[in-house]
Every structure is written in structure tokens, then in C-alpha cells.
């Protein structure tokens, strides 16, 4: 079980998918990410790609973001995500059983914060995701993309974006990316 760390759903226990293909963000890393975002996410729009359990989306909603959209392609994992979202029954959290790249190609909506937590070793998928976000201008000015990965050197930052912060937590790297001005 995972727990929501702070906000209105603090200490809520949520399920994690019981599959080898998922790797939920640890409480330590999630707490570090949201501590760095602090109050910047209040009343902002969040997109959670490769959402898994939905812990990042639920944490964002718990801490006051105005809306969150969680995208998860795998049907079994999506069923767990659905259960977790049902626990909070918050109309500001929308979930979609969809491929992240298909969603990005079809949307014209811009987001303040975009979380990318693709399966490790899926670097090409992360790189295509970043490229699509940049090309379609889906990140607002002063918005942030947060990527969790196990290999910073495998991530290619496309033209129009830049890394402004990188943190390491054990074997996990977290990249913070913004528009390149």
C-alpha cells in the first residue's frame, strides 16, 4: 500500500498495482518532488502520464491543484487507478485508460505541471513524450515537467525545453524541465 503524504487526503492508503511492469514512486521521492513544488501547484492544472496507481495525481489534488488528469494505458493498472480515485471521489481528478502519446497527439490543452513516470528503460518513450509536449506547446509558460528515471543520460531534452534542476535519490533521478526562454 502507498500513502498520500500531505494535504486534504493525508495518510490515505491507496493500492499499488501488483505487476512487475510498474514501479510506484516511493514516498521519499514523492515527498521530495512535492516539497520542491510547495505551493506552486495550488490552483494549477496537472497532467500525470503513465499514472500507475495515481499516487502523483492524488497527491497533487490533495495539495490543492485545481485539476489533474491521469493517463494509464495498461488495463490492469488502470483498474487499480480507478479504485484509488474512487476512494477520494474528487471531481477535479479525471482518469483515462489511454496511451500517453495518443492522448498528447489529440489534446490541445496546456498544463502547468506534467509528470512523466514511464517504466524504467523506456527511454525512447520518454523522449517521444517530451518531443510531443514541446512540439504541441502543451506546457504553459513557467510550467514544469517532472521526470522520474533511472538514467538521466538516456533522456534527450528537445529544442524548446531545458533542464533547470536534477536530483538523485538512491538510484532514482528526478529531472525538472521548463520551457527554454
Image (cartoon, rainbow, N blue to C red):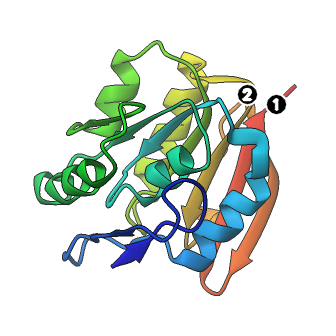
Query: 37 or 179, which lies in front?
Result: 37
Question: In the rendered view, would you say 89 is above or below 21?
Answer: above
- Residue at 41 percent of width and 67 percent of height: 12
Q: Which residue is mark 1?
A: 180
How many dots with numbers?
2
Which residue sits furthest front?
Answer: 8
- Residue at 46 percent of width and 48 percent of height: 57
Question: Which numbered disc flags the more N-terminal residue, 2 or 1?
Answer: 2
Q: Which residue is mark 2?
A: 160
Q: Quadrant of the N terminus?
A: bottom left
Q: Position of residue 78 (x, y in %)?
A: 19, 52
Question: In the rendered view, would you say 38 is above or below 99?
Answer: below
Horizontal arrangement in the rendering, residue 67 relative to residue 2 (left or right): right
- Residue at 37 percent of width and 21 percent of height: 105
Q: Quadrant of the C terminus?
A: top right
Identify the secondary structure beneath mark 1: loop
Amino acid at each position: 500500500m502507498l500513502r498520500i503524504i500531505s494535504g486534504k487526503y493525508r495518510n490515505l492508503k491507496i493500492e499499488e498495482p501488483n505487476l512487475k511492469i510498474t514501479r510506484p514512486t516511493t514516498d521519499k521521492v514523492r515527498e521530495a518532488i512535492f516539497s520542491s513544488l510547495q505551493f506552486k501547484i495550488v490552483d494549477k492544472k496537472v497532467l500525470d502520464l503513465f499514472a500507475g496507481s495515481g499516487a502523483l495525481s492524488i497527491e497533487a489534488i490533495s495539495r490543492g491543484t485545481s485539476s489533474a488528469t491521469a493517463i494509464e494505458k495498461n488495463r490492469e493498472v488502470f483498474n487499480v487507478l480507478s479504485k484509488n480515485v474512487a476512494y477520494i471521489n474528487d471531481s477535479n481528478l479525471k482518469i483515462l485508460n489511454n496511451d500517453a502519446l495518443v492522448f498528447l497527439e489529440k489534446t490541445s490543452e496546456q498544463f502547468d505541471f506534467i509528470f512523466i513516470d514511464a517504466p524504467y528503460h523506456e527511454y525512447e518513450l520518454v523522449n517521444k513524450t517530451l518531443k510531443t509536449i514541446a512540439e504541441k506547446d502543451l506546457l504553459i509558460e513557467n510550467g514544469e515537467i517532472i521526470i522520474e528515471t533511472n538514467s538521466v543520460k538516456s533522456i534527450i531534452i528537445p529544442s524548446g525545453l531545458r533542464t533547470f534542476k536534477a536530483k538523485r535519490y538512491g538510484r532514482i533521478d528526478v529531472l525538472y524541465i521548463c520551457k527554454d526562454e
